[in-house]
Image (cartoon, rainbow, N blue to C red):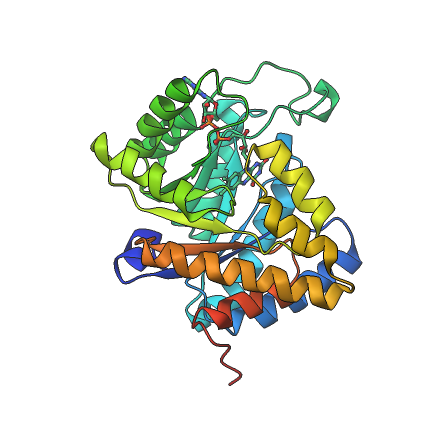
Amino acid sequence: MARITHLLDAGPTLSFEFSAPRDEAGAERLRQTLARLSQHRPQFMSVTYGAGGTTRGPTRDWVSAIRDEYGPLGVSEMPHLTCVAHTPDEVAQIIDEYRQDGIENILALRGDQPQSNSQLPHSGRLPAFETAAQLVQYIRKRADWDIGVAAHPEGHPMAASVEADLAHQTRKLAQADFAITQFGYRAEYYEQFVNQLDARGVDTPVIAGIMPPTNVAGIERMSALNATEFPTEVRERLERASSPAERREIGVEVASRLGRELLELGAPGLHIYTMNFARAASEVASALGWKADQT
Ligand code: FAD
């Protein structure tokens, strides 16, 4: 496994994000997706962490599966970890487990508070972490890892104000080794965000997150949740499409153009949100020059 900061130094990097599936059918699809996307030789693959710690075991298992299967091909693995529903002791245990697994990269997140206490893995005890920045500090003291954080170039939806959000993100990114952005569809938001960090003296590499827009309802829902703009022109093109194949073609074209713009702006890497589907992500990677290696 390689450290993400080293991969970024040699960049630009390509990475893919997956989620632990809920059933065997989903697991089989994810195995096929991993096999196909690994042919693009991404620098790393990451696995999300269910809100409230609900995928603690599965996230670890899938991260290990990626390491065992694709590590020999030069693909590194990275777990996500959210802290909002965990006590410090629980986080310390998780860090120990990952240390045993040989993990060296982690994405440290706050996560969103589960709807009810019954969803909390520690049965309602008050969590001690309120922000991702606190989790970064906690991990830093316990593990010599590369620690990434989430970046929100269009602002976080729960932010008290644009200024407070930017001040928080600046402080958080200053402590991190790298960041990965929420998905978005306008490169200018990325550019503005990186310039604002730069003006505040923060040069932490910011990997750009891309989600190929192939499903109008899904993107609309997630954009509303994340407060990211879903451009009208993209939505209208997708709505006019008459088949899933045509929508995929549009989604791949939009994401590939965005990826090229982001790389031209100096993004040190692209992180593709796959939703555990291979085809659109594979076509975007190919369009951007990361061709699949069939050997
Ligand atoms: P934080 O940085 O702690 O805070 C988010 C916002 O709250 C800040 O931007 C700021 O507006 C405000 N804020 C916090 N503290 C302060 C402060 N002291 N002063 C002022 N404002 C403050 N969620 C999951 O559940 N599982 C995942 O695996 C997952 N992976 C993700 C991967 C990426 C790349 C991204 C971008 C997001 C991911 N998320 C995931 C979503 C994430 O958990 C949510 O966006 C969550 O609401 C915020 O997490 P954060 O780590 O950005 O939080």
Place of residue 197 in the rendered image (x, y in percent of width and height, measured from the top left): 28, 34
Within the image, what quadrant is residue 147 found in? top left
Identify the residue at image location x=45%, y=68%: 288
Which residue: 43% across, 73% down? Answer: 289
x then y, percent, for residue 273: 56, 52
Q: Is residue 239 left or right of residue 153?
A: right
In the image, what residue occupies the spot 70% across and 45% down? 218
Quadrant in which residue 227 is drawn: top right
* Image-quadrant location for residue 54: top right
Q: Is residue 20 visible?
A: no
Number of numbered markers: 0
Residue 95 screen position, x and y as percent: 46, 38
Q: In the image, is residue 108 above or below residue 98?
A: above
Quarter placement of the N terminus:
bottom left
Name the residue rendered at 56%, 25% in the picture: 86
Q: Nearer the viewer, residue 4 or 231?
A: 231
The front one of 249 and 64 is 249
- Please determine whether, in this image, residue 175 is positioned above or below residue 242: above
Q: Is residue 123 above or below residue 190?
A: above
Task: Indicate the position of residue 237 as horizontal and vertical percent values.
Answer: 66, 56
Farthest bottom residue? 295
Q: Is residue 264 above or below residue 154?
A: below
Whether residue 81 is visible to the viewer of this picture, yes or no, is yes
